[in-house]
Amino acid sequence: MASRKKSLLKVIILGDSSVGKTSLMNQYVNKRFSNQYKATIGADFCTKEVVVNDRVVTMQIWDTAGQERFQSLGVAFYRGADCCVLVYDVTAPNSFKNLDSWRDEFLIQASPRDPEHFPFVVLGNKVDLDNRQVSTRRAQQWCQSKNDIPYYETSAKEGINVEMAFQIIAKNALELEAEAEVINDFPDQITLGPQSNRPSNPDNCQC
Amino acid sequence: MEVEQSSIRSDSTCEFLDAEGDPEATDPEANLYQEADHDDPEAEQQQNHSIISELRDGLGRGDGSTALSPEPGEPAKGLAASVESLALSTSTSAKTEDSSSGVEEEYDYQHDSLWRGQKKHIFILSEAGKPIFSLHGNEDKLATLFGVIQALVSFVQLGQDAITSIHAGGIKFAFMQRSSLILVAASRSNMSVQQLQLQLGDVYNQILSILTYSHMTKIFEKRKNFDLRRLLSGSERLFYNLLANDSSSAKVSNNIFTFLTNSIRVFPLSTTIRSQITSAIQSNCSKIKNLVFAVLIANNKLIALVRMKKYSIHPADLRLIFNLVECSESFKSSENWSPICLPKFDMNGYLHAHVSYLADDCQACLLLLSVDRDAFFTLAEAKAKITDKLRKNHCLEAINEELQQPFNVKLYQQVVGIPELRHFLYKPKTTAQLLCPMLRHPYKSLEELERLEAIYCDLLHRIHNSARPLKLIYEVKEREVVLAWATGTYELYAVFEPVVDKATVIKYVDKLIKWIEKEYEVYFIRNHATF
C-alpha cells in the first residue's frame, strides 16, 4: 500500500480537569492561548495536517473532558485510537498521580491489541509557572516504568515544546501503523450446499 | 439553550430527538464544542447544556412521549443548530505553518454555504470515527465532523441504545450501524428515515460487495483503528454512482425509484425473443459446474436471468450488479474477470464474474457468476457461443431495436393514450420488478424531478407505514392529482394533471391496469429460468 497518499491518525488527549488539554490542542492547532478556563463538555475535536517523513498525515485530535461529570461518552469513544496523550499539570501533584488511572482507563476502554506497546505520550504542562511541584526526574521515572513512554514538558501558554511533542506523537503513531500489514487473505471460496442456505424470502423480495 | 422537548420512543431505539430552541439565543456556553477564543470566566461553574447533556436528558426521560412534531410555526432548529454548531465550532482549518511544502491548503467545508446547502449528505465512517467516505467534499477535511458523529453514536450506545435519527431544522439525520461501520444520511428532502436507511443499506451492501463481510470484520477485529480507505481506494466511483442514482446528481433518471421500491427494472421484450435469449444461455451454460447466475442487462434493465436451481437473486444484489456495470466503462472494451460479493446471496465470499458486452454492435452486458475462481476460460467460451447463437436467431437485433428507441414506444403511447397521466410506478406483489414510463414534461427538469421524487417518497412511506399501512390514497395537490393503490396483486402510484376529477382518474387507472395485465409478459419476467 505504498501508493497511499494520506494517513489519518486518531489522537486522544486525556488527563485531569484543568491541566491544559484544550489549551495544548488550541496552541498546537490554532497557535492561540487563553488564560480563561472553560471546562470541556464531553469532547472537542480538531484536525491538523502535518508532514511526517514526507507523508501528509491528518491528525484527528479528540480532546476529552477532564471533569468526571462530562466523561461518560461511552466505551466506543476511545475505540480505534492511534495514540493517547496523557497530560498533567507540573504544579498539581494530584494530576500527576492520576496518570496511572488515566492510562489504565484508556487501556480498558480502548482495549488496543497490544497494550504493552500502545503509543502513549506524556506531557507535563504549565512549565511556565513558578510553583512547580512535580520534578522532571519523577515524571521521567514514571514514564520509564511504563515501557518508556516519551515524556515532554510543555507550556501551552508560551508554546514551549507543543509543536515538537505533537510531531513525535504523529511519528510514533505512524510507525505503529506502518508495521501493521493489511490482511490480504482472499475469503474462502463459497461452497454451494446441497440445499439452498438462502430460503426464499417471504416478502417477495426476489426478482 | 433550553431543551423544550426531548422525546424518544419506548422501544429502545432513539427514534426522535427533537430539541427545540431558538438558535438565535444560543449561548456560546451551550455548545459542546466551544471555540477557544470565546472567553467566559463563569463557564466553569455553569451547568452547561450541550448536545450530549441534551441527549442524556432525553434518554433519561425515556417516557415514550410521542409529541414528536415541532410547534407549528416554530421549526425545530434547535438540535440542528447545535449539531451544526458542533461542526462549526470545531477548528478544522489549521495549517501547519512551519512545514514549507507538502501540506495543501485545507478547505473548510463546514463554513462553506454550498457544502452546507447540499440536499443530501452521506457519510461513512469506521466505528472509531475515522472517515471513509463523504458524498460531498473531501472526507479527510471533515475529520472533525466524523468525530462528532462517532461521539453521538458512542454516547447513545452507552445507554444500551442505538441512535436512529435526529430531526431538526428541516434536516433528517438517519443513522445506521453495521458491523464496524457507521453510516449517516443527512437530508433536506422529504424522504423518510426508513427510506434514507434503505439507501444507507444499499451503500453498506456496496462496501460488502467490494470487501466481503468476513474480510472487513477480520480487519477491524485485528485493528480497530484501520483506515478502510486503504481497501476502498479506486472504488469510490461505485459509491458516487450508486448515490448519484437520484436527483442529488444532475442526472434525471428513473433510477431513484428502483431503490425506493426495492426493485429492478426489466428490459421490455416480446416473450418469444426473451425465451430465445434465455434458452441460448441455458443451452450453453447448463453443463458448467459452479455457475450460479447468468445475468444479461442493457440500459440498466434486466433482459434475462438464469440461475442455478434453488438459488435466487435479491433485487439489492442485482442493483449492485447494475451499478457496477453502469460505472465501469472498461467492460465495454474487453472481457473482464472480477470478484464480486453479492451480500444477500453470501456476504462472506466472492462470486467470480465473467463480464463482457455481447458484441461491439450490441450493448447488452452479460455477467456469468461462478463460485469457481478458475472458471474464466470456460465462461469466456460459453459467452462466445451465447453471442453466436443470439446473432443467428436475430436476438441481438431485437435488443438493439429496443435500445435504439429513445424510450419504449408502446409504453409511451399508452401514457399518451391517457394524456393526463404524467408518470406512474407499477410493481407487482409477486416480483421485485418495477414498471415506470420515461420521465417527460413537466418532470424533465431536475427541480421538478425532485418534486416528483418527494411525492412518491411520501406516498410510499404512507402505504408502507408499519404502524398504519394504507391501501388507497387519493390526493388533489396544488400541481397534480396523485393516487396510490396497494392491492393483493400490485402496487400502483400514479401522478395526474391537476385538472382531472376522481371519476376520470378511476377510469384511467382501470385502463392502465388492464393494459399492463395484457402486456405483462413484455414488461415483467414471471419466473427466472434455471440451468
Image (spheres, rainbow, N blue to C red):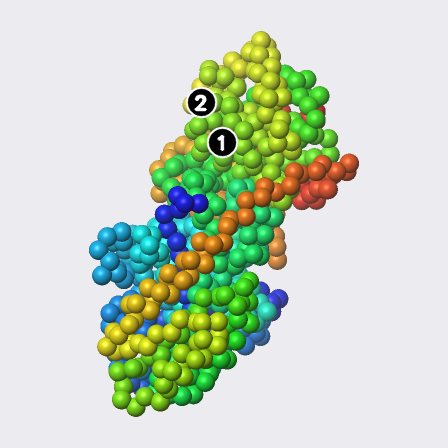
* Callout 1–callout 2 Cβ contact below 8 Å: no
Q: Is residue B62 shown to the viewer in this render? A: yes
Do the dots labelled 1 and 2 sit on one chain?
A: yes
Q: In this view, does A109 lie to the left or right of A195?
A: left
Task: Name above or below for residue A89 compared with residue B130.
Answer: below
The 10 Å Cα crowd at callout 2, few under 14, some 14 to 19, many 20 or more, is few
Given the image, on which type of amino acid does mark 1 rest?
Val
Q: Where is residue A92 in the image (x, y as percent from the top left)?
A: 37, 88
Task: Name above or below for residue B62 compared with residue B427.
Answer: below
Element carrying mark 2: loop
Kindly identify which residue carries mark 2: B333
* Callout in the foreground (1, 2): 2
Question: Quadrant of the image for the C terminus of chain B?
Answer: top right
Q: Tell me which residue sits at (34%, 74%) in the image.
A: A152
Given the image, on which type of amino acid does mark 2 rest?
Ser
Q: Tell me which residue sits at (59%, 10%) in the image.
A: B393
Q: Tell me which residue sits at (60%, 18%) in the image.
A: B381
Q: Position of residue B243 (x, y in %)?
A: 44, 43
Kindly identify which residue carries mark 1: B325
Circle 2 chain: B
Task: Give the label on residue B187, or none.
Answer: none
Q: Position of residue A3 (x, y in %)?
A: 39, 43
The disc, 1 or 2, on the residue closer to the chain's N-terminal end is 1
Q: Is residue B390 left or right of residue A49?
A: right
**Mark pair 1, 2: CA separation:** 12 Å
Q: In this view, does B398 lie to the left or right of A43?
A: right
Question: Quadrant of the image for the N terminus of chain B?
Answer: bottom left
Q: Which residue lies furthest to the right in this view?
A: A194
Q: Is residue B505 shown to the viewer in this render? A: no
Circle 1 chain: B
